[in-house]
Amino acid sequence: MKKQPKKLRKKRVGMPIDPAAVAEKAKIEGRRRFLRIVRNGAISLPVLAGVGYFSVQSVQASICEADLTKIGQGKPSIVQVHDPQCPLCRTLQRQTRKALKSFDSDSFTFLVANIKTPDGSSFAARYGVPHVTLLLFDASGEMVQIVRGPSDTESLRAIFETHLKTYS
């Protein structure tokens, strides 16, 4: 027998409805719904925690790198004047980070002066430099060299090596 569409079906009149069966069915559906929620939560919780952890790490690193008061605190500093929307700036930052990986991070301070912030903008204006620029400072905070534009990683590594040997 073919099933009729819902609208055309006749209501079953006179059939007794077992309230215990209806209650049991609702109870089972409630358990299934609860277990589905628990399962989905158990799957998504580690994913969200991982994303949150890496986001917090990234934000903390950005905040730490933006603290321009660290210049002249006993370590040579390398400061990138950076515009986050500029592709050349992002290229320079990527090359700079690659070049700096070969050095002990305790021997220097790498900072980023974001020109989209008031501090970064005033920093760039103080030294009269545009974005896509690296400023190299000695341990006492005196600027000793300017590197303009993106450079290849090997060139930057050689510049940083000379700077750190001279001013450490």
Image: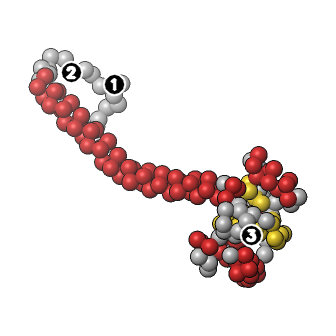
Q: Earlier in the sequence, mark 3 or mark 2?
A: 2
- Mark 1 element type: loop
Residue 82, position in %: x, y? 76, 59
Q: Quadrant of the N terminus?
A: top left
Residues packed near mark 2 inside 10 Å, few (<14), some (14 to 19) or many (20 plus): few
Q: Amino acid at mark 1?
A: Leu
Q: Quadrant of the C terminus?
A: bottom right
Q: Amino acid at mark 3?
A: Asp
Q: In this rendering, is residue 18 above or below 120?
A: above
| Label 3, label 1: how far apart the Cα atoms are | 87 Å
Q: Which residue is identified by label 1?
A: 8
Residue 92, position in %: x, y? 74, 68
Q: Residue 12's mark?
A: 2
Residue 138, position in %: x, y? 74, 70
Residues packed near mark 3 inside 10 Å, few (<14), some (14 to 19) or many (20 plus): many
Quarter holding residue 24: top left
Q: In this rendering, is residue 50 above or below 10?
A: below
